[in-house]
Image (tube, rainbow, N blue to C red):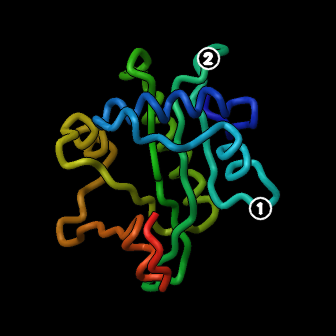
């Protein structure tokens, strides 16, 4: 069963985020907290959303997403920040069902795109996404500014 996440799901969502971080070889990188996730997902003006895959009474997967925008189409899309299915629940159709739900949201709302990023070494995920009809964007490279560099760009020269 796929459904929108609720505040009661936050501890399990954080657990899945930590599982993903371990898989991505960054087990100590998670700074998110239950309180922080509750605020961004269920606060007064959420900008981030989540759907969960539930097997019986257990949440086995999560899709965390937000809206993006294409100036070329003049329409919103969905950016899938993370898709996580617990290791013991993989190959059960949960990931496909979560992506399908986001695709349904796109179609129903007139959004033009469903975007995400995949680590270049995660061949299993790449095979899965190709099986959905997705394709890598060969001519685009993701860029990011964080930490001290972000503060410098903002005009704040204080180191973290």
Q: Residue at x 60, y 26 (%)?
A: 12
Occupied quadrant, residue 28: top left
Query: Which residue is identified by label 1?
Result: 45
Mark 2–mark 1 CB contact (< 8 Å): no
- Residue 132 screen position, x and y as percent: 33, 44
Give the secondary structure at mark 2.
strand
Q: Is residue 114 above or below residue 96?
A: below
Q: Total number of numbered labels?
A: 2
How many other residues sit within 10 Å of disc 1, few (<14), some (14-19) or many (≥20)?
Answer: few
In percent of width and height, residue 56 lies at 63, 14
Residue at numbered disc 2 = 58
Quadrant into which the N terminus falls: top right
Q: Nearer the viewer, residue 63 or 74?
A: 63
Position of residue 96 relative to residue 107, above or below, is above
Residue at the front extreme, as displayed: 158
Of tags 2 and 1, the one toward the viewer is: 1
Of all residues, the one furthest to the right in this rendering is 44
Q: Secondary structure at mark 1?
A: loop
Instruction: Name the residue located 52 percent from the left edge and 42 percent from the top edge.
Output: 63
């Amino acid at each position: 069963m796929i459904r929108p996440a609720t505040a009661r799901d936050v501890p399990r969502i954080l657990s899945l985020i930590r599982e993903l971080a371990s898989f991505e070889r960054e087990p100590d990188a998670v700074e998110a907290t239950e309180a922080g996730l509750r605020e961004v997902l269920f606060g007064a003006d959420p900008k981030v959303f989540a759907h969960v895959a539930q097997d019986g009474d257990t949440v086995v997967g999560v899709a965390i997403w937000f809206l993006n925008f294409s100036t070329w189409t003049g329409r919103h899309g969905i950016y899938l920040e993370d898709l996580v299915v617990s290791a013991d629940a993989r190959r059960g159709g949960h990931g496909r069902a979560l992506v399908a739900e986001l695709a349904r949201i796109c179609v129903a709302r007139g959004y033009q795109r469903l975007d995400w990023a995949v680590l270049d070494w995660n061949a299993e995920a790449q095979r899965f996404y190709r099986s959905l009809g997705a394709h890598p964007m060969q001519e685009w490279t993701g860029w990011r500014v964080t930490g001290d560099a972000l503060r410098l760009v903002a005009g704040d020269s204080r180191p973290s």
